[in-house]
Amino acid sequence: MPLRRLVVRAVPASARGAICWLAMASVTAPLAAPTTVYVQLPAGTLNSVLAGDADTGPLTIAPFAMRTTPVTIGEFRRFVRAHPQWRRDRVAATFADAGYLQAWRTADAPGDAGGEAQPVTQVSWFAAQAYCEAEGGRLPTWSEWEYAAAADATRRDARADPAWRARILGWYSRPASDPLPKVGGKPNVYGVRDLHGVVWEWVDDFNSLLVDGDSRTGGDPDKLKFCGAGAINLQDRENYAVLMRVALLSSLNASDSTGSLGFRCVHPTH
Amino acid sequence: MQANPSRARFAIHRAATTAAVLALALAASAQAAPAAAPSNRAVAGGAVAALPANSVYQLAVALTDQDGHDFRLADRRGKPMLVSMFYSSCQFVCPMLIDTLRDTESKLDAGERNQLGVLMVSIDPARDTVAVLRRTADERAIATPRWTMARTDAASVRKLAAVLGIQYRALADGEFNHTTALILLDADGRIVARSSQLGNADPAFVLKVRQTLQAASH
């Protein structure tokens, strides 16, 4: 049940990258939420790194609106207070593991665990999905995330550029013990920020990434594990930067939470 | 929930990258959920006990069966269940899945079978309408209503699969990739065992079914 009604306050009719503000009118919440910014991404096509999709040509991506930044600690604190079933001391173990919001000082206050503007992490897929539903949306699909994240500051698809890949791989080499940066990095061509360089992000269909990169499936005892066409083969093996995300997501259970995994939300648009 | 090491298998043919990926995967799985203790057990006077915190029935999912009857997942609480996910148009693995469920049941005696429910939920809600589920049940001689073929909305399919640890992916040609799994729930909806063996029943899984049925009858 949405916590607050989302009101589209302004949708400039300009071309791609047009920003719409989804103002969060505080209908039921006692706590005023700051304005949450979504940007509109236009329809387009995507050559996914996942070969299962590439076999039949590029994917068609329907237009959607995406949060410009990952959900922050401050935003998630307000969510937990409004929806106490998502406090770490009340959440069902089915929906969140023992690491859920573990770094918070108390069950409903992050304390010194991080600044309000840092991305929230230690959240399970169920908690992330519930947050997005409270905001009237959902988690992005892998394809939507990959589509948005293929861009750089000037191009919709910068993935073939070695500099693009090098920047991302440089982030991967940052020690995990370093504090997470605040959200609000440089926008890409759509106006979306922090898709690379801050946190890993949950996607709606994380459990669709049946990865079996080894194509030698003949005689594989696991062959029958996959119905239909079998596991995904990796189309673009050079693109480690994105494939590492696929690998991480495909290894997760929905109740898992880790210190470097956050999320953002999307709204379908028409 | 059991770990599923093969899910983390990911062969990029560069050793260094593979090692990095595995390290990530291990970092993630190192925080696996502990089994939660049941909370708020029954109060006196016959009140229904609160669900265990790690019960699949914590998930609020509305389903519709092959005869058009609506029910909630948690309505299945009270007896052990075999749960699986499938889609009707699947030509190869899904029929084997049904055969495997049937073979698993055949290892039980009649009394045990009557204490066990079987629930198959479609991962293809767009095509698996109630009428299609009914036809599939008839074609496969499914013993409804003891077995249930059910559908729900797409978002709930994703959540149910997440709770059950099942992966699936729609393909452009209308087929699905999905992990095949027979999942045993105890009477309170906790996952007791799972098997991905197709064809003949997995003896270790059958033993778990028996033990769970015995525990539930006491």
Image: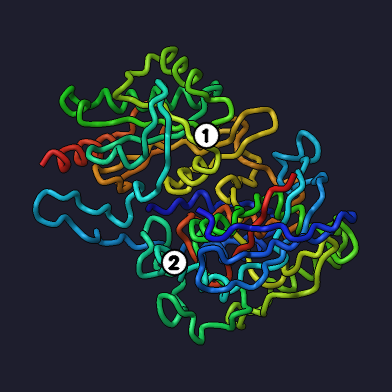
> Is A186 on the left-hand or right-hand side of B25?
right
Compare residues A219 and A201 and report the one nearer the observer. A201
Question: Which mark identifies residue B123?
Answer: 1
Compare residues A116 and A45 and report the one nearer the observer. A116
Total marks shown come to 2
Question: Residue B76: which quarter of the image?
Answer: top left
Above or below, A30 relative to A159? below
Which residue sits at x=33%, y=55%?
B54
Above or below, A226 relative to B69? below
> Is A61 on the left-hand or right-hand side of B3?
right
Furthest toward the bottom, the residue is A112
Question: Which mark identifies residue B6?
Answer: none
Query: Mark 1 or 2, which is nearer the eye?
Result: 1
Provide residue B42's location: percent of width, then percent of height. 16, 55
Q: Amino acid at mark 1?
A: Ile
Provide residue A177's location: percent of width, then percent of height. 58, 81
Which residue sits at x=33%, y=42%?
B74
Q: Residues within 10 Å of mark 1 (few under 14, many from 20)?
A: many
Provide residue B216's location: percent of width, then percent of height. 17, 41
Indicate the chain on which mark 1 is placed.
B
Q: Secondary structure at mark 2?
A: loop
For the residues marked 1 and 2, what is the alpha-carbon distance in whole angstroms? 28 Å
Question: Which mark identifies residue B31?
Answer: 2
Which residue sits at x=60%, y=72%?
A33
- The quadrant of the rendering that contains the C terminus of chain A is top right
Q: Residues within 10 Å of mark 2 (few under 14, many from 20)?
A: some
Q: Amino acid at mark 2?
A: Gln
